Image: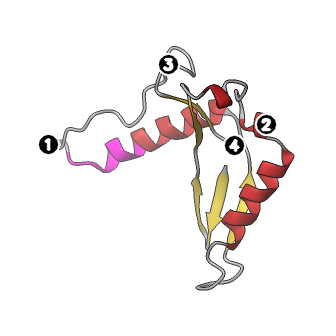
Amino acid sequence: MTFDDGGEVDDKVIAVLADDKRMDHIKSFEDLGEHWKKETTYYWEHYKDLKKPGTCSVNGFFGTERLWRSSRAAKRAMARSTPSWWTDPPLVQKPQSIEAGPARLFMP
C-alpha cells in the first residue's frame, strides 16, 4: 500500500503467517476482500485525526513485484547514504518463492 503521511510518501507491507491454516487461501491482498481494503484504507486515513486531521491518504494497493522494486530501491538508497566503513546485512532478499519465509508477503 502506498501511503501519504502529511507529504511523506512511503509503502506499507501487508503480510500473513505462512503456517496459519486459516490464511492458506491468501496469496495476494486481493484475497482479503473489498471490505478489508476499505477498512484498512479508512484506518490509515484517520489514525492521526486527533493530532492532524486530514493529513494522511492511501494512494493505492499494489502487488509483490512493486514490493521487490521498492525494497531494492531502498537498499540502493541506503548504500549511497551509508559510510563505506558501515556493513550491514541486506534489507530484503527476494526468496525463491513468496512462501519461502515464515510469512507470505504481498504489498497492497
* Amino acid at circle 3: Ala
Which residue reaches farthest left?
85
**C-alpha gap between disc 1 and disc 4:** 36 Å
**C-alpha gap between disc 1 and disc 2:** 43 Å
Viewer can see residue 78: yes
Taking depth in this image into account, of 62 and 14 the one nearest to the observer is 14
* Amino acid at circle 4: Pro
Q: Residues within 10 Å of mark 2 (few under 14, many from 20)?
A: some
Which picture quadrant has residue 7? bottom right
Q: Residues within 10 Å of mark 3 (few under 14, many from 20)?
A: few
**C-alpha gap between disc 3 and disc 1:** 32 Å
- Secondary structure of the residue carrying tag 1 is loop
- Secondary structure of the residue carrying tag 3 is loop
Q: Which residue is mark 3?
A: 100
Does the stretch in magenta take in 12? no
Q: Which mark is residue 108?
A: 4
Q: Which residue is mark 2?
A: 30
Which picture quadrant has residue 62? top right
**Magenta segment boundaries in residue numbering:** 77-83
Does the stretch in magenta take in 78? yes
Mark 2 or 3, nearer chain start: 2
- Front of the two marks 2 and 4: 2
Which residue reaches farthest top?
96
Q: Which residue is mark 1?
A: 85
**Residue shown at the point (67%, 64%) measured from the top left:** 44
- Front of the two marks 3 and 4: 3
* Amino acid at circle 2: Glu
Q: Can you give x and y, in whole percent of width and height, for residue 43 in the image? A: 69, 65
